[in-house]
Amino acid sequence: MDVRADQVQYNPYRVFTRAEWAALRDDTPMTLTAEEIARMHSMHDRLDIKEVEEIYLPLSRLLSFYVAAAQRLFVAQRHFLGIEDRKMPYIIGVAGSVAVGKSTTARVLQALLARWSPRPKVDLVTTDGFLYPNEVLEREGLMQKKGFPESYDLPALLSFLSDIKAGRRPVRAPVYSHLTYDIIPNEGVEIDRPDILIVEGVNVLQTGRLPRDGKAVPYVSDFFDFSVYIDAEEPILREWYVERFLTLRDTAFRDERSYFNRYAKLSDKEATEKALSLWTTINLVNLEENILPTRPRATLILKKGSDHVIETVSLRRL
């Protein structure tokens, strides 16, 4: 995270180089195989055993401390109140720009945490499922702002997280299709009392204007116990977005069912120009106005370089 020299002493984060962070793995065992790791990374993202060993195993170890501490606090509070509430699930948010690799991070964390001993139940949901259907977005003139805060059914997402925290079972989340670029009607995934839930999405750390009357206004991040922001400089994100668009043009976009099938026959020059236009008019605006401003709210920031390798780790001080 960029911090001016005169602000270093006030930095709420401890910043680690890759080597410093890797040393914090200690004796945390590697529980994933090379084949499993190879299946987890998203398009054009980089993930190998070294990245898991040096970045994600130390993070897994840190999270084990956080989860254990939260469990102890829950037991203490239960005793204090004299109640018998069931242990609430630990919720981890994963945020960051389009094309930064949030899905890769979320999947790796899910796999590593699920192999702790004893084996916890770890579920993963993306906020894409809580986007309004295209029919609604078109009616409200929001199709060009898909992924912006106003394009999500926030009451449904908050209700989902509230039910998860309350231990209700099962809780149903809607499903999104990246092929049709829309919510799949009458489909959902059931989340049944996980020990840990990972919630991934571009705007999960988003807040809003506080009310003048001091009334409670819930935000998605209010339900998080820990949050991770995946970071990279804007020119790098733009390059990754264009690379991904060109690859999709030659793969998923060729499917006649694809919402973006009209881009499948574009030349390299045309496709690059289209991708840059979409980035500049939609994704960059969302990044600058809604996503990047939430970075300082994360518990942990993973900063990537142009080769997709995480270069620094910033951990919020307690």
Image (cartoon, helix red, strand yellow):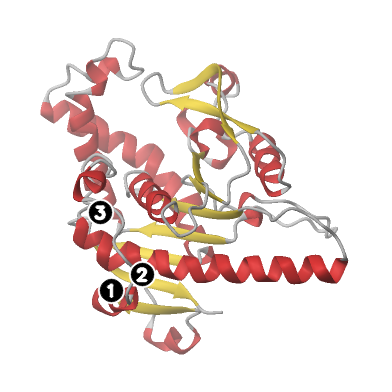
Callout 3 touching callout 2 (CB < 8 Å)? no
Q: Nearer the viewer, residue 135 or 71?
A: 71
Q: Position of residue 166 (x, y in %)?
A: 73, 47
**Of marks 1 and 3, which one's residue comes earlier in the chain?**
1
Callout 1 touching callout 3 (CB < 8 Å)? no
The residue beneath circle 2 is 58
Q: Neighbour class for label 2 at 10 Å: few (<14), some, many (≥20)?
A: many
Q: Determine the secondary structure under disc 1.
A: helix
Residue found 75% across the figure and 72% down from its top: 76
With 280 as the anchor, is 86 left or right in this view?
Answer: right
Q: Which mark is residue 235?
A: 3
User: Looking at the rendering, which quadrant does residue 23 occupy?
Assistant: bottom left
The residue beneath circle 1 is 22
- Position above or below: 98 against 208: above
Task: Identify the amino acid type marked 1.
Answer: Ala
**Of marks 3 and 2, which one's residue comes earlier in the chain?**
2
Q: Quadrant of the C terminus?
A: bottom right
Task: Identify the amino acid type marked 3.
Answer: Pro
With 257 as the anchor, is 290 left or right in this view?
Answer: right
Task: Measure the alpha-carbon separation of dots 1 and 3.
Answer: 27 Å
- Position above or below: 218 against 159: below
Q: Quadrant of the N terminus?
A: bottom left
